[in-house]
Image (cartoon, rainbow, N blue to C red):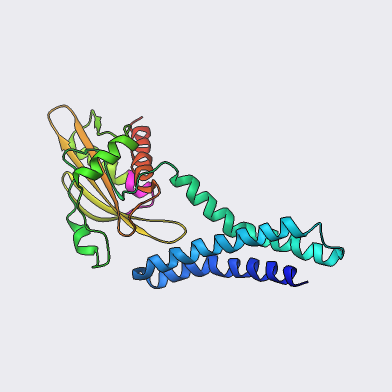
Amino acid sequence: MRIVYLAECLAYLSLILLPGSVLFVRLAPAQYSAALLCFALSALLALIAIGISAVFTRRQSDNAHRRRLSRAAVLSTPAIGFFAFSLYLGSGSPMIHDISTDTEDPPQFVQARQLRSDYHNILAYTDSIAEQQRLAYPALQSLTVPRPLAEAQTLALRTVEELGWTVTASSPGHIEATDQSFWFGFIDDVVIRIEADSQSSTIDLRSASRVGKGDLGANARRIQRFLTHYRQSLN
């Protein structure tokens, strides 16, 4: 009986901590570390509840106890599922949070520096970050298109809008925007640089997370989505 009650308590607690971690980081973004700890704790409690259910369900002679253990396992799946999915998305990604298509001369943020608070990451693309990025994301490269600057920029702004980003600054050859993650609501900054000659324009992007040492690959995926969407729009 006690083991059944324990499994149920752990399962319900995991269900409480899962949305609680989201509310925590959205209401107090400076405490994002505590929110992520709650997220990890919800997954741990869910895993324990599932383990208890797996071990003790068949040992229960009472059918009601078996059903309660099975229910505890089912209630634990959201927390462990979300956590496992997050780990899957970030598998193989380095512990960096600043990604650029140009690792030698990355686009520079201007407006984003004004939007960041003291607890946010510093916007400094170092040689160490560049080296790790080249090893992890060798396919992320500048995009050259046969379009003049004005047309290339118009298409870039349209792509930003279609991706759901929020433009924070725009001038010839320079666009800045923010993108918000779905679950925790983390806000990341993006800068787009467009350099043109007489025949074409070269587009470079840089995406940087405001919080966290690693980004689970989110910035690289964001840049790749933009490049893919932009190429499709050219057609």
Left or right: residue 45 compared with residue 71: left
Outermost residue to the left: 198
Q: Nearer the viewer, residue 117 or 158?
A: 117
Location of residue 127 with respect to 199 vertically, above or below: below
The location of residue 27, given as percent across then percent down, is 41, 73
Q: Is residue 175 magenta?
A: no
Left or right: residue 38 compared with residue 61: left
The magenta segment: 159-166
Q: Nearer the viewer, residue 173 or 115?
A: 115
Query: What residue sits 30% from the left and 59% below the top?
Result: 210
Query: What residue sits 38% from the left and 52% below the top?
Result: 164
Query: What residue sits 70% from the left and 63% below the top?
Result: 72
Query: What residue sits 37% from the left and 51% below the top?
Result: 215
Left or right: residue 146 compared with residue 67: left
The location of residue 90, given as percent across then percent down, is 43, 46
Q: Nearer the viewer, residue 72 or 52?
A: 52
Q: Quadrant of the C terminus?
A: top left
Location of residue 183 with respect to 134 vertically, above or below: below
Count of all numbered marks drawn on residues in the image: 0
Left or right: residue 180 compared with residue 15: left
